[in-house]
Image (cartoon, coloured by chain):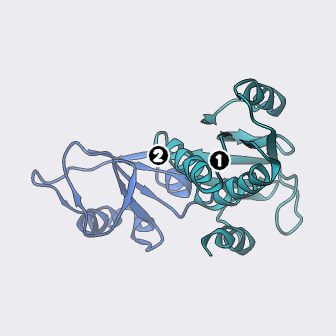
Chain colours: A cyan, B blue
């Protein structure tokens, strides 16, 4: 259901494997997040480092996946999240949901990403030519997350 | 006991620090105060303690054999 990946994330393989694991669903929605080449101010980002707490980070991913399963009446979710050093443009997260019909799968994938962006146990460092910065969720991330608490 | 540190704490202080816990344990607040004497960054309110991989309040009791960590605010994925 979830995996913390320290090496390269290959979205096409993850999607193929997820689809092969299903039985009788009519819809799969998948999302791939890529490491952006620029920061919020438009400065070039030379790399991203995602620090994870072995055990606790996986548990946070599992809790988010379980909430998505319980909330949308979907049949399966698949989340793979990178940790460690990530190059600009490289996949950082794969999130997919499978359901009988597309609407629930779309909503669940949207929910998965909003939760992952704020509640996943990671500490993110953006590296630029002039130094590195540890970052926190943006107000936009918090607002996206709050949509689901209503 | 080993205390684990993550994110910017792990970078600036180190991934783990050693601390001699009193035999009967102590509260998170007492542990934090003791560690902050040497590592001021641990005094910040935004830094939270974890016992056995769960974020806990300041009055939680730290006992020998538990896995203790201090973490900065989560950045999310």
Question: Where does residue A13 sit, x and y in percent of width and height?
Answer: 80, 26
Q: Is mark 1 on a helix, strand or loop?
A: strand
Residue at figure coordinates x 60%, y 56% from the top left: A71
Image disc number at residue A115: none
Residue B18 located left or right of residue A48: left
Given residues A25 and B6, the one toward you in this image is A25
Q: Residue A50 carries which label?
A: 1
Is any part of residue A34 visible from this angle? Answer: no
Could you tell me which chain the residue with mark 2 belongs to?
A: A
- State the residue at coordinates (47%, 48%): B14
Q: Is residue B59 above or below residue A104?
A: below
Where is residue B28? Give x, y as percent. Answer: 27, 64
Q: Nearer the viewer, mark 1 or mark 2?
A: 2
Q: Which of marks 1 and 2 is nearer the N terminus?
A: 1
Look at the image and tell me in which quarter the C terminus of chain A lies: bottom right
Q: In 3D space, how far apart are the residues under numbered discs 1 and 2 (Cα atoms)?
A: 14 Å
Residue A56 numbered tag: 2
Q: Name the residue at 31% across, 65% down.
A: B32
Q: Quick one: B20 or B49, which is closer to the camera?
A: B49
Q: Relative to A136, say whether B24 is above or below.
A: above
């Amino acid at each position: 259901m979830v995996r913390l990946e320290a090496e390269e994330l290959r979205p096409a393989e993850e999607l193929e494997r997820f689809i092969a694991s299903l039985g009788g669903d009519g819809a799969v929605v998948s999302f791939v997040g890529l490491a952006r080449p620029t920061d919020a101010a438009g400065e070039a980002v030379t790399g991203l480092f995602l620090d994870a707490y072995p055990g606790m980070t996986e548990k946070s991913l599992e809790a988010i996946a379980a909430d998505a399963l319980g909330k949308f009446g979907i049949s399966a979710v698949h989340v793979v999240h990178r940790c460690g050093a990530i190059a600009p443009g490289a996949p950082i997260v794969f999130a997919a949901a499978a359901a009988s019909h597309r609407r629930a799968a779309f909503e669940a994938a949207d929910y998965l990403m909003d939760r992952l962006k704020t509640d996943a146990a990671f500490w993110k460092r953006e590296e630029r030519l002039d130094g590195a910065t540890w970052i926190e969720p943006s107000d936009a991330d918090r607002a996206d997350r709050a949509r689901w608490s209503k | 006991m080993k205390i684990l540190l993550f994110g910017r704490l792990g970078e600036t202080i180190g991934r783990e620090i050693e601390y001699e816990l009193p035999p009967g344990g102590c509260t998170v607040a007492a542990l934090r105060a003791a560690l902050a004497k040497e590592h001021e960054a641990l005094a910040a309110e935004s830094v939270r303690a974890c016992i056995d991989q769960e974020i806990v309040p300041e009055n939680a009791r730290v006992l020998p054999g538990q896995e203790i960590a201090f973490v900065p605010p989560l950045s999310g994925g």
